[in-house]
Image (cartoon, rainbow, N blue to C red):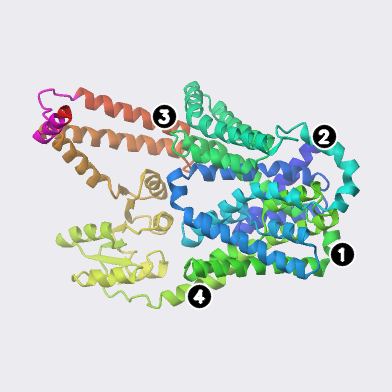
Amino acid sequence: MTEYFLQAFIYLTAAVIAVPLAKKLGLGSVLGYLIAGVVIGPIIGLVGSETNTIQHFAEFGVVMMLFLVGLELEPKMLWAMRNRLLGLGGLQVLGSVSAVLACAIYAGYGFSTALTIGLIFSLSSTAIVLQTLSEKRLNKTSAGKNAFSVLLFQDIAVIPMLAFIPLLALPELVEKAQGAMAVANEQHDSLSLVANMPGWAYAIVLLLAIGVVVLGGHYLSRPLFKMVADSGVKEISTAAALMLVIGIAALMSLVGISPALGTFLAGVVLANSEFKHELEANIGPFKGLLLGLFFITVGAGIDFTVLFANFAEIILMTLGVMLIKGIVLYLLALIFRIKGSDRWLFTLSLAQAGEFGFVLLNFSVQQHVLPTAMAQTLSIVVALSMFLTPGLFILFDKVISPRFQNKTNQRTQDDIEEVGSVIIAGIGRFGQIVNRLLISNGIKTVVLDHQASQIDSIRRINTKAYYGDATRPDLLKMAGVAEASLFVVAIDNRESSVELVKYLTHTYPKLKIAARAFDRGHGHLLRAAGADIVEFETYHSALEVGAESLQLLGYSDASVARRKATYQRIEKEASKRLYENWLSESGGKSFSNDFIKLFLQYEERLKQAMDEDTDENELKLPESFDANNEAIDKV
């Protein structure tokens, strides 16, 4: 028991020290985990033989990550991205396999071995790429969306690869390992529902397992989580979420399917569930910790003995694989018209091998397709390519991205000639209304926007505006922020708006700040950052449409006015209480179970208030509704 405590302490200490340092140096958390693994493994030797065992456990972090990815998707979204999923993803796998196959055959490997190597190296690291894109807030860019499509196809493609690889078994390896593998197969079969099944029976079991996940997720998850939520015990809610993911992963393993793909499918099924946010909140911390542990084991598992014995060969093979994949990805980016810096981001982000490469390598050895010595060498190539990936992101950030920004942004920052008592950052549809109202009342404003076309457009209607990035301190000083009374934040970027409010609050504490929020979560972040006034961009217009809709449905003007006032009163109170709950329960990071319960309580309170305001004499449907009902009756 003491040994397990010491190992856990070593891994956690390495992560706690290395990751903050790596983040501070701009290297990213993934590289921090990898460096931590190298230090405690090959360099210091604090961990050793247990690394491979821990890595199998830590791979469950990938399973959880794909479950959370699935929660963010909906079947309609998957159908909408089918062209990129099948076209871009399919061509990437096919192109990478073909290119690596040709190079391996040229290097003297047999066809079966070369094809297996091609399959292994065609996959990229879902864990590293999605984690890094998310940290750098690049997952919503064109490159991020296309990279996600490719990674999703690769994860799905692992299943047919696992089915196909046994057909490539080498007779000499089968004969050499026949005796030893007999015992291993017996142990493996005891934990499999599909061992020695004929093809037709395996297909039926496969379909049944997928059907259990889909139908169970759709019909059984709701009563289960409702029962758990009614219990009011937080740890049981967490246990239920873990039970769901682990159970699905176990079922998929028993029928020979990738656990990651099974949990991803379950996530998609539950994407429309009202318990979606609760699942995310419960699974998120475990996912992050296990993913970090996985990256540490990758670094700790690098065998420097094998590396130094074949140093030149392994380094050339690693760089060669990344170059080949990079060329294939760049050509596909051209074909699919991925433009500008997104083309390079797409290429560099997917040029590595991935964690499923370790799975295919182990499986290939078990199925007598690759010799053990070759698998050890290839596993180092996979690990090194993953280790180099954060460096490629740094190359993109420091070298490639600035060059494209300079090309697309030739216009220099305007010199601000006049200052006013109010500074407005962002002159889009929201900022324009604020600016017009203030100007019409004789208040001088300074308008800033980073979109040149927007500035030119607004100047045509005799509105003075200046081109520049409102998040830059030098521009703010030039605009007279130190003397301003009010700052209106109306920029379109969520993260930038929150960071701007934080900067203004800290640097100019006497400055009043009014900010535009996209939704409730964004509004909470702005309030926590220090904004004095936070308004949702669609709140008032949506409220007016709702009120006018009630009038069209036959409610009297007096009734609509009362109901509108009731809604505003309850919403104001709810907004304050929900913000306080959000801040205290989750530290401003997510929507907790208590937050959701409180929200539902206010929804019920709103409904009760509306029911109490009912006046049967006031509700008279318009003639058009009566005509429609008569038409329906005739049919």
Nearest the camera: 216 or 60? 216
At label 1, the amino acid type is Ala
Question: In front of the other: label 2 or label 4?
Answer: 2
How many numbered marks have been drawn onto this rendered protein structure? 4
Residue shown at 60% from the left, 53% from the top: 154
Neighbour class for label 4 at 10 Å: few (<14), some, many (≥20)? some
Among the two numbered marks 3 and 2 on one chain, the one whose residue lies closer to the N terminus:
2
* For marks 3 and 1 on the same chain, the one whose residue lies earlier in the sequence: 1
Q: CA distance from mark 3 to mark 1?
A: 60 Å
CB atoms at circles 2 and 4 under 8 Å apart?
no
Image-based side of 522 in relation to 543, left or right: right
User: Callout 3, which amino acid?
Assistant: Lys
Q: Nearer the viewer, mark 3 or mark 1?
A: 1
What's drawn in magenta, residue-wise? 613-631
Residue 186's disc number: 2
Q: CA distance from mark 4 to mark 1?
A: 40 Å
Q: What amino acid is labelled 2 in the image?
A: Glu
Please give the residue where the numbered disc 1 appears in the rendered image: 309
Residue picked out by circle 3: 597
